[in-house]
Image (cartoon, grey):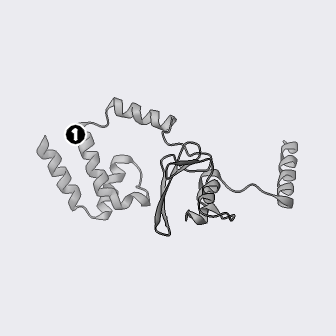
Amino acid sequence: METSMDNQIDYIRQLDDGRLVERWRTIYNAAPSDCLKPWLKQLLIYQVQEHRFGGLGADVLNKLRDIETNPLLQPNPQGFVPGTKIIRSFGNVEYTLTALEVGFDLNGVFYPTLSSTIKKFTSKSWNPAKLWMIPAGFSRLLTGPKPRRGRSAKKHLRKRRLNVDKN
């Protein structure tokens, strides 16, 4: 049985891109998505091995389902996953900022917000994202778009009310 599997793997390694896609369609009854195409050989070889040795065990599948329903890594209120470290040098001193479930640890000292860490360096009002060199829009990736303000917010709310009243 082992030789048959080895032969199948050798065969897959020799296939060109067109034949790989064709084999994928035969197995999964669908074309592979574009993002998978660079890994088709590896995925098809894995499929042969999975067929020979069996898939994931029940304990692993249960653990994956548990992680899916109760993710281990929840972002804190400011959008950072606890344990995330940002290391920066100011002057000749290296500072390590670690995200906690609530707040931040800066070289062993607790700070409730990212903004409060700035007081360690300056009395001026700085943007914490710039000071810590956090990419623009990082927190918005996790928290969603900024809330609307001013006239556009009022228009938006008025439209929503009108749509709700129509239904």
Residue 66 horizontal side relative to residue 2, left or right: right
Question: What is the crowding at mark 1: few (fewer than 14 residues within 10 Å), some, or many (at least 20)?
Answer: few
Looking at the picture, does residue 65 appear above or below residue 8? above
Residue 49 horizontal side relative to residue 93, left or right: left
Q: What residue is pinned by disc 1?
A: 52
Residue 101 horizontal side relative to residue 52, left or right: right
Residues 115 and 124: in front is: 124
Query: What amino acid does circle 1 point to?
Result: Arg
Quadrant where the C terminus is found in the figure: top right
Residue at point 43%, 61% (across, down): 34
Residue at point 30%, 37% (across, down): 55
Direction left: furthest residue: 3
Residue at point 59%, 46% (across, down): 103
Residue 40 horizontal side relative to residue 72, left or right: left
Looking at the picture, does residue 162 appear above or below residue 146? above
Residue 136 appears in the picture as rendered? no
| Residue 1: x %, y % from top left | 13, 40
Direction bottom: furthest residue: 91
Looking at the picture, does residue 87 appear above or below residue 102? below
Residues 46 and 137: in front is: 137
| Residue 36: x %, y % from top left | 39, 57
| Residue 24: x %, y % from top left | 34, 53
Looking at the picture, does residue 55 appear above or below residue 134? above
Number of dots carrying numbers: 1
